[in-house]
C-alpha cells in the first residue's frame, strides 16, 4: 500500500485501515505499508523502516522505532508529527472579509452545500474541516468565484488568492518559477525585483527563479504556490488542503511559513483541511462541515475541548 490514506479524513482513514487489517488477517497476507503518518505505522505495522533520501536510516520493531528512535531523522519526524496549539493572535477586526448567506450548491440530485452561513472577519484565521466529500472545496470555490452558488449570497471584500493541495498539478510544468509567480502580479513592472523579494519571503533563493517546477521537492513546490498567491498582496488567502500531500516535517515547515506570512501581511485566512489538529496549529476559529452543512463553528479551543456535534466528536476521537 503506497500512502493509501494520505488524502483521507480521519474517519474515512479509520475505515480503510480496518479494511486492510481485516484482509491481511483473513487471507494471511504480508503487508508493506508506505506512509508519512507515524500514527498509522504504529497501528498497522509490527516492523518499521525509516527511509531518508533513499537510504534506510533506521529499522526495527515499530514500538522501538517510535518510542526509542535512534537516528536524528526519526527523532525529527516524531517531533514534527506532534502538532500543538497556535500562538495567540491579535484580535480580528470587526469588518467582514467573507460573508456567506444561506449558500447552497446543488449538482444534479447531489447537494454539495446546503444553506451555509458564515462570517469571516478581516485578519482572522478560520479553518474549515470535514470528511472527504463534505463540501469543503465546493464552498471555497464559491468564495473564490470559481463556482456559482445555486442559491444564496457570497460577499467578498478585498482581493483573494488561493493555494491548492497538489503543488505538482497546480504549477505549469512548462513555465519557469519566475513566470509562474509573475502570473500573480496584477501589474507587470519590476517583475524580477518583486519575484526575488517573494522568493526570499517563502524561503527560496533568487536562482530558483529560472528553474522549472519538476526541479523542486514537494515542499519547495508548495512554497512556489504560496509565493504566487502572495506576490500581488492579496487581502484574503484561501488554502485547500495545502499541506495534506506533504510529509510531517515538511508540513510543519509550511505551517510555520503560513503562520508568519499571515501575521506579517495581515491576511485573512480560510484554511481547509480534513485534519483538525492541523487546523488547530494555524487557526483561531473553525467551522465543521458534514454532508454539505456547517454543523458547528466557533473558537478552535472551544470546539477542540467541548465539541457539541456528534460528527465533530467522531472526528476528534480518531485524531
Ligand atoms: P470536499 O472538498 O469536502 O472533499 P467537495 O466539495 O469536493 O468535498 O464535494 C462535495 C460533493 O459535491 C461531493 O459529493 C462531490 O462528489 C460533489 N461535487 C463536487 N464537485 C462537483 C462537480 N463539479 N460536479 C458534480 N458533483 C460535484
Ligand atoms: Mg476538497
Image (tube, rainbow, N blue to C red):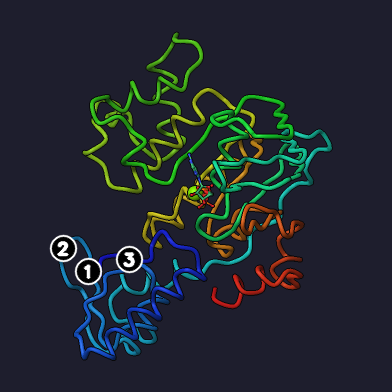
Quadrant for the C terminus, please.
Answer: bottom right
Distance in Å between CA atoms under marks 3 and 2: 21 Å
Is residue 4 shown left or right of residue 86?
left
- Residue at 39%, 83% (x, y): give it: 43
Q: Secondary structure at mark 3?
A: loop
Distance in Å between CA atoms under marks 1 and 2: 6 Å
Is residue 196 shown left or right of residue 299?
left
CB-based contact (under 8 Å), mark 3 and mark 1: no
- Residue at the spot of label 1: 51
Give the x, y percent position of residue 172: 30, 29
- Residue at 75%, 36% (x, y): give it: 99
Is residue 37 shown left or right of residue 234?
left
Instruction: Please say if 172 is above or below 165.
Output: above
- Residue at the spot of label 2: 54
CB-based contact (under 8 Å), mark 3 and mark 2: no
Give the x, y percent position of residue 220: 34, 43
Residue lying at the far left of the rendered structure: 55
- Residue at 49%, 64% (x, y): give it: 9
Instruction: Please say if 115 is above or below 95.
Output: below
Distance in Å between CA atoms under marks 3 and 1: 18 Å
Residue 29: quadrant of the picture? bottom left
CB-based contact (under 8 Å), mark 1 and mark 2: yes
Is residue 266 shown left or right of residue 8?
right
- Residue at the spot of label 3: 4
Residue lying at the far top of the rendered structure: 189
Quadrant for the N terminus, please.
Answer: bottom left
Give the x, y percent position of residue 161: 54, 31
Amino acid at each position: 500500500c503506497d500512502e493509501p490514506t494520505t488524502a483521507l479524513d480521519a474517519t474515512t482513514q479509520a475505515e480503510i485501515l480496518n479494511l486492510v487489517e481485516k484482509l491481511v488477517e483473513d487471507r494471511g497476507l504480508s503487508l508493506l505499508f508506505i506512509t508519512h503518518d507515524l500514527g498509522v505505522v504504529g497501528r498497522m505495522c509490527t516492523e518499521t523502516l525509516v527511509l531518508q533520501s533513499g537510504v534506510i536510516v533506521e529499522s526495527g520493531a515499530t514500538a522501538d522505532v517510535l518510542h526509542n528512535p535512534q537516528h536524528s531523522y526519526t527523532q525529527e519526524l516524531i517531533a514534527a508529527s506532534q502538532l500543538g496549539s497556535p500562538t495567540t493572535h491579535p484580535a480580528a477586526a470587526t469588518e467582514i472579509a467573507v460573508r456567506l448567506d444561506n449558500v447552497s450548491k446543488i449538482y444534479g440530485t447531489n447537494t454539495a452545500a446546503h444553506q451555509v452561513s458564515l462570517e469571516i472577519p478581516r485578519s482572522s484565521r478560520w479553518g474549515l474541516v470535514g470528511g472527504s466529500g463534505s463540501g469543503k472545496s465546493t464552498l471555497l470555490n464559491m468564495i473564490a468565484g470559481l463556482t456559482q452558488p445555486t442559491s444564496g449570497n457570497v460577499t467578498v471584500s478585498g482581493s483573494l488568492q488561493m493555494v491548492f493541495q497538489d503543488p505538482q498539478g497546480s504549477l505549469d510544468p512548462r513555465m519557469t518559477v519566475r513566470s509562474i509567480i509573475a502570473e500573480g502580479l496584477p501589474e507587470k513592472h519590476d517583475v524580477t525585483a518583486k519575484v526575488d523579494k517573494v522568493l526570499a519571503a517563502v524561503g527560496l533563493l533568487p536562482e530558483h527563479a529560472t528553474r522549472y517546477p519538476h526541479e523542486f521537492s514537494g515542499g519547495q513546490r508548495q512554497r512556489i504556490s504560496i509565493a504566487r498567491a502572495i506576490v500581488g498582496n492579496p487581502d484574503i488567502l484561501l488554502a485547500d488542503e495545502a499541506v495534506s500531500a506533504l510529509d510531517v516535517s515538511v508540513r510543519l515547515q509550511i505551517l510555520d511559513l503560513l503562520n508568519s506570512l499571515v501575521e506579517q501581511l495581515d491576511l485573512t485566512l480560510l484554511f481547509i483541511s480534513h485534519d483538525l489538529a492541523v487546523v488547530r496549529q494555524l487557526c483561531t476559529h473553525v467551522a465543521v462541515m458534514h454532508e454539505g452543512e456547517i454543523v458547528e463553528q466557533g473558537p478552535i479551543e472551544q470546539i477542540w475541548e467541548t465539541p457539541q456535534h456528534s460528527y465533530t466528536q467522531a472526528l476528534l476521537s480518531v485524531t
